[in-house]
Structure formats: structure tokens, C-alpha cells
Image (tube, rainbow, N blue to C red):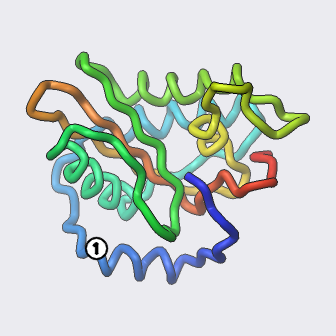
Amino acid sequence: MTNCGTVVTPALLLSFIFILSVPAIAEPSVNRAQALQAHNNVRAKDKQLPLQWSSDLESISQQWVNQLASSCKVYHHQGNVPFGENLFISTASTTISHAISTWANEKNFYNYQQNKCQAGKQCGHYTQIVWKGTTDVGCAMKSCSNGSQIYVCSYFPGGNVVGVRPY
């Protein structure tokens, strides 16, 4: 979720997608309209422009969630990726709206003036959702063999640039 100053262009994102060789998603693993609306409701509360759905980011999310579900462990992409990423795991059956709501509730721990989270709390999922420069989102879900569900949402351009406020 952290962007360390890399300049990300649409061409770089497309290169990354090509390298992944991600197949098109025939049937979505999340309700796209529900996911987009939930994101845009959070953004509207902070007067940010709505996101648009990206099939490319959905494909990236699906490929990643498939890999995570194979071990039922959640961890972010490593290295320099040209997008932001939010992850959620639940031991009970849930929805993409619930995952996004959980991320959005991190706003309670974010101090805008200080541009940081309360000690011991997370707020980077929330700040990624409302990141001013982010224009596109794509999400996916996969169930693990133990019944847990993992959700991944990918964002372009990624947010959470160190030292920069989300809006």
C-alpha cells in the first residue's frame, strides 16, 4: 500500500498486467456494482471524485487472491508494484461491502492534521480508498479451503505516499 515515489504511468501498469498474463475474468467473484458503490460512498463523504471500475485491476486482484487463498494467508505484493492494494480476510461468509466498510471505519483512527494513524491502529486501507489521485479500482474474492474468504482490491494510481495527505 505504500508508494515510495515511483512514477507510475498507464503504460507501466499495462506492462505489469502483460507480465502477469492474467486471463480475462468470465464471472466476477465480487459484485462489481456493489464494490464500486461502496468505494464511492466512502469517497463522497470526504468530497473525493468517484472511482471507475477497472477490469485490468479486477484481473490483478483475482490473480493475487487466488494465490493468497492457496495458503489462506494474507500479505501484500512485494516490491515495486504500480498500484495500491487493500486486503481483507474473514472466517465467516461476508460481502465486498462489509470488507470496504471495515476499511472505511479506519477513518476513526486517522488524524488528518498530523497525517497519521493513532498509535497501534491501522488507517492505510481507509486512506487508500479516499486517495485523491486514485481513479480506478478492481476487486476480487476467493474462499480458502477452511471456508475463510479473502478479498483484494487494487487501486490505480496507488496511494499512501509517505508524507503526503490523502486529500
Q: Is residue 154 left or right of residue 4?
A: left
Residue 7 higher or lower than 107, as above or below: below
- The amino acid on which the numbered mark 1 sits, given as a three-letter code, is Leu
Q: Residue furthest top?
A: 92
Q: Is residue 71 left or right of residue 42?
A: left
Image position, residue 118 (x, y; %): 73, 26
Q: Alpha-carbon neighbours of circle 1 within 10 Å: few (<14), some, or many (≥20)?
A: few
Residue drawn at (17%, 43%), measured in percent from left and top? 71
Q: Residue furthest left?
A: 145
Image position, residue 3 (x, y; %): 62, 62
Residue drawn at (70%, 46%), measured in percent from left and top? 49
User: Who is closer to the viewer here, 93 or 77?
Assistant: 77
Image position, residue 24 (x, y; %): 22, 64
Q: Secondary structure at mark 1?
A: helix
User: Who is closer to the viewer here, 132 or 65?
Assistant: 65
Residue drawn at (33%, 30%), measured in percent from left and top? 89
- Provide the residue designation for mark 1: 20
Q: Is residue 5 left or right of residue 10?
A: right
Residue drawn at (11%, 27%), measured in percent from left and top? 146
Image position, residue 82 (x, y; %): 52, 69
Q: Residue furthest front?
A: 120
